[in-house]
Amino acid sequence: MSRVDQVLSCADNALRTLSGTYIAAHPAPTADDDPGEALPQEQRRLSAALMRVNHVGEVCAQALYNAQTLATDDPALKQQFEAAAREEFDHLAWTRRRLQQLDDRTSLLNPLWYAGAFGIGLLAGRLGPGISLGFVAETEAQVEQHLQSHLERLPAADQASRAIVRRMMEDEARHASDARAAGAVELPTPVKLAMRLAAKLMTRTAHHV
C-alpha cells in the first residue's frame, strides 16, 4: 500500500476500535448467551471492572500494532503485526460483548488510551525491528501476567469471563514467543519498569472510569 493508504488504514482501525464497530472472526470461547445478570451484584461489578480493564488493554493493543505496522518498512514484520492485530480484534470483541452481558460499559477514556499507545508504538517502531519486536515481547509478557492476576480475582462462578481470559492468555503468550523468534531484543530494565508503571496507572484508572 502507498503511504496515504497506510495512513487511511490506520485511521480506519482507530475509528472501528473506538466506535465498537468490529466483529470477531472467531466465536468467544464460551456460550455467547451466558448471562452476567445471574451473578450476585457484587461479583458482577467485580467481573465488569476487570473485563473493562481487559478491554482497555485490547484497545491499546490495536493502537500499538497499528502504529508499529505503519512505522516499519519490512513486509514480513508488517504481516506479523497485522496477523497479531487481527487476533487482538477477537479479544476486543469478546471483552466488549462480555461487558454488555454484565450490563456495564467500556472505559470512557478509550480515546486517550488509544492515542497514548499509538504514540508509544510509533516510537518503538521507529527505533528499528529489534526494539519494536522487543517492545511487543515485553508488552505481551506483562499482559500475560496481568491476565493471570485477573484469573485469580474473577469470581469462580463467572465461567464466561474466565474462559475469555484464559484464551487471551494463550494468544498473548504466543505473540510474545513469535516476537522473540523474529528477532526481539531484550529491553533495558528501566524501560521495563516504566512500562509496568504506565500499565499500573492505566489499569487502576480503567477499573473505575
Image (cartoon, grey):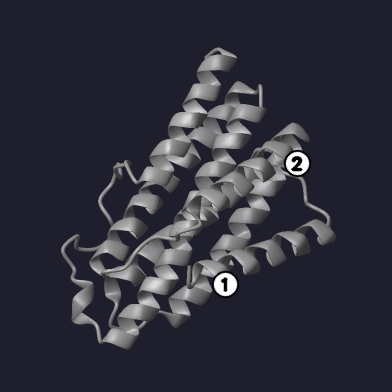
Categorize mark 2 by other alpha carbons within 10 Å: few (<14), some (14-19), many (20+). Answer: some
Q: Quadrant of residue 163?
A: bottom left
Q: Residue at x 65, y 50 (%)?
A: 137
**Residue appearing at x 55%, y 63% in the figure:** 144
Closest to the observer, 206 or 31: 206
Number of callouts: 2
Q: Confirm whether residue 186 shows in the render.
A: yes
Position of residue 55 in the picture relative to residue 137 (left or right): left
Residue 58 lies, in percent from the top left, at: 47, 53
Percent position of residue 157, x then y: 28, 83
Whether residue 181 appears in this view of the structure is no
Residue identified by numbered label 2: 131
| Residue drawn where x is 42% and y is 65% of the image | 52
Q: Is residue 78 left or right of residue 123?
A: left
Distance of label 2 from label 1 (alpha carbons): 27 Å
**Residue 204, labelled with which disc?**
1
Asked whether disc 2 touches disc 1, contact meaning CB atoms under 8 Å apart, the reply is: no
| Vertical order, 133 against 52 (above or below) | above
**Which amino acid lies under the numbered mark 2 shown in the image of this protein?**
Ile
